[in-house]
Image (cartoon, grey):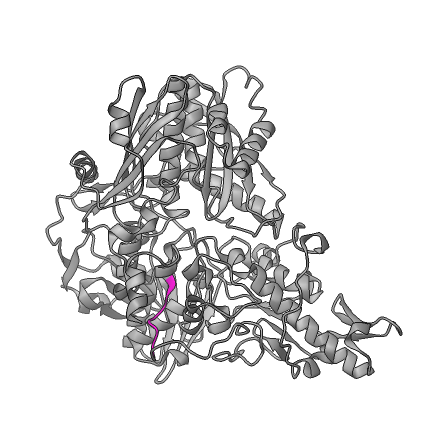
Amino acid sequence: MADQDKKSKKGKWGRRAFMITGGVVGGGLVVGVGGMLWVNHKIKQYTGEGMGAGDSLNAWIRIAEDNTITLAVPRSEMGQGVYTSIPMLIAEELEVDVQKVKIVHPQPESPYANTFLLTGQPRNVYKGMTLMEKIASVLPVVGTGGSTTISDGYDTLRAAGATAREALIMAGAQRWGVDKSECYAEDGHIINKTSKEKLTYGSLAADAAQIKVDKIPTLKAQKDFKILGKPVRRLDIPEKVDGTAEFGIDARPEGLLYAAIRHPEYLGGTIGSVQNIEEVEAMTGVKKVVVLKDGQGVAVVADNSWRAKNGALSLEVTEESNGHEGLSTAGVAAKMKSVIANNEMIATPESEGDVASVIASEGNQLIEAEYLVPYLAQATMEPLNCTVHVHEDRADVWVGHQAPSVIRDKVAAITGIDGANVTINMKYLGGGFGRRAEVDFVIKAAEVATVMKGTPIQLSYTREEDMRYGMYRPAVMSKFRAAITPGGDIAAWENKMALQSVGHSSMMRIMPSQAPDPKDDPMSSEGAAHLPYAMGSRKVAFGDLDLPIQVGNWRSVGSSQNGFFTESFIDECAAAAGKDPYVFRKNKLADHPRFVAVLDKVAEISNWSEPAGDNKFRGIALHKSFGSIVAEVAEITKVGEKEFSIDNYYCVIDCGRTVNPDTIEAQMQSGIVYGLSAAMYGQITIENGKIVEGNFPEYEMVRMNVTPHITTHIMEMDEYPTGVGEPGTPPAAPALTNALFAATGERIRELPLVKHGYSFV
């Protein structure tokens, strides 16, 4: 696997592959894994544990005699709707009512690998698996992130449903003694075309389980869909409404004790000693104080979470700053400015033509701008938590996490228990946004539970510990230069950035041996390099920062900041050329008809060509991320000098074929609100080597009274589906700031907006 390791360090695996690889490949070259791995019911490393009673037609489908149909959903449900979309994909080909199926979250076994995370390509169900797909399945790589669930499973899950349906048809044909062409499937039954007799799937499941389907049936064409592309009521909503839904923090195994943690306050700091352990352990309800390895924290275990928290707050610790006590937000900004000014670029992911010469030539208008965004926390509503019960020879974990294969391997490493004996009880995630792909809270829970062997321990971070010991979106500075011709063309485009590498930082925590070099991290330039706009010469480069600040994945990752940078600067170019921002963009997209169609549609539904009205202004933004093209128009009303109401957001998405349009609309709304929260208020600041913000009063979110009305249009496309969970976020900030420019003439190049005196009502 030396060659594969080399590839990983060059950043040639999928953009989130490093996050969720979950372990290294053992035993040399991967062999004996065929292309039918995910649909054949005799699957290597598949146990079906936890799927309940019934006959397993394959790893995804189990049917009991009473016709109860259980479907496996191995992706994490964090509000993005996968507990409905995955069953829809299976049910479409299986010919069952999606509202009548039962959902289980299986253990992280081979059939459930998310190969798209490694390859960036959908699996061809009619061909054997590629080497990378085999690696992903054997590890296995089981994770949720990068808006990949549908892209990974679209054909695979439909093939699972079609294969099970075929086996049931063959079993029915055998029962009646007819050719299988005389039978068809409908609404959970096999029907005899001639006699009109019906047999339930449950009555045939045992026989069907013994039938091997060697060839995957032809999958339905889009025109024949009965479920896909139509709005379906989400299967997880009823229990979330009536309160029976279980999130990670709801885990209550018998004998549970609670743990709270104190982290080092200094960035990159460590806890050297604790002076009052005996005193804290004498507090009412406190069972034990556990000093974590390498000075990374101290946990207090108690009989309820309140006592554990108070115990943790009572700890008297000696902390080492490790030389970072002088670090500040202003100091970080100065470092970024220095990197760009001194051209300390470590990578140039895009370079076409001679940008410097074109910019230096006479006759063109030179436009320059420098943009800056701060560190951001994911700020999930459910506090970070993990429950672990360590026994002598096994361990049980209850958690909401984005990568169960990672959890299994990390808990196995901490406890010394074989990974096969680590059971993951996956719960709903009260928000993920990349933070719940991290492993810190899992490792620390396992460490405390190992000390308290025989007792289940639920470790939770307080909001302050979460906010101040975060894995932030990096602060980024982005400097642009562009040469605009008299006719309004972009003759040259130059973009230099300074930031910390998300891929390197996150993987150094998750799997150090697989961490990419910062120069090979594609996340740093995603959404900035290879823009669709026609340009003469172009160059995009970035430099790295060596700082003790942990950075990680944040909803839409590099595109979250680069979408703001590029779409703001495109607007600056349009203004310099004296062109309408919509028309300017469209004229640069002649070679990209899908972009044009999305842009035209958002202009249409927002009435862009009509006057906005008194004191009303609009801004537009267009961005592609995770394979999907999204355009947004913000419509605002000026009610004071720097006081605005955000009235409407118009959003258009081209994500290929749709699965559940209701989910797509919800994700566009969610992504816009998330992006607006960051644009308007979001900032993590540093003073004297410590994070300032500790809770929501200091880290504001968009409230209902400020939230705009959001209109979403989904383009009808017969193309392979692409991501939905993250693409709504990148255009949100530039659409708003471009509207504010239209209203005030002030070009906003630094976020959040509250720093510039703006307020919203």
Q: Which residue is drawn at 29% across and 74% down?
A: 414
Q: In this view, does 590 lie above or below 218?
A: above
Residue farthest along the top direction in this orientation: 614
In the foreground, 291 or 56: 56
Residue 54 in the image, given as x and y percentages of width and height:
64, 80
In the foreground, 439 or 602: 602
Residue 95 in the image, given as x and y percentages of width and height:
71, 65
Q: How many labels does the image show?
A: 0
Q: Is the magenta stretch mostly helix, strand or loop?
A: loop
Asked where in the image residue 126 lies, by quadrant, the reply is bottom right
- Is residue 516 visible to the viewer in this orientation of the structure? yes
Residue 233 in the image, given as x and y percentages of width and height:
65, 53
Asked where in the image residue 328 lies, by quadrant, the reply is top left
Asked where in the image residue 90 lies, by quadrant, the reply is bottom right
Image quadrant containing the N terminus = bottom left
Provide the residue span drawn in magenta: 20-26
Q: Is residue 24 magenta?
A: yes
In the foreground, 108 or 614: 108
Residue 580 in the image, given as x and y percentages of width and height:
47, 20
Q: In this view, does 101 lie above or below 606?
A: below
Residue 327 shown left or right of residue 358 in the figure? left
Residue 669 shown left or right of residue 386 in the figure? right
Q: Does the magenta stretch include residue 11?
A: no
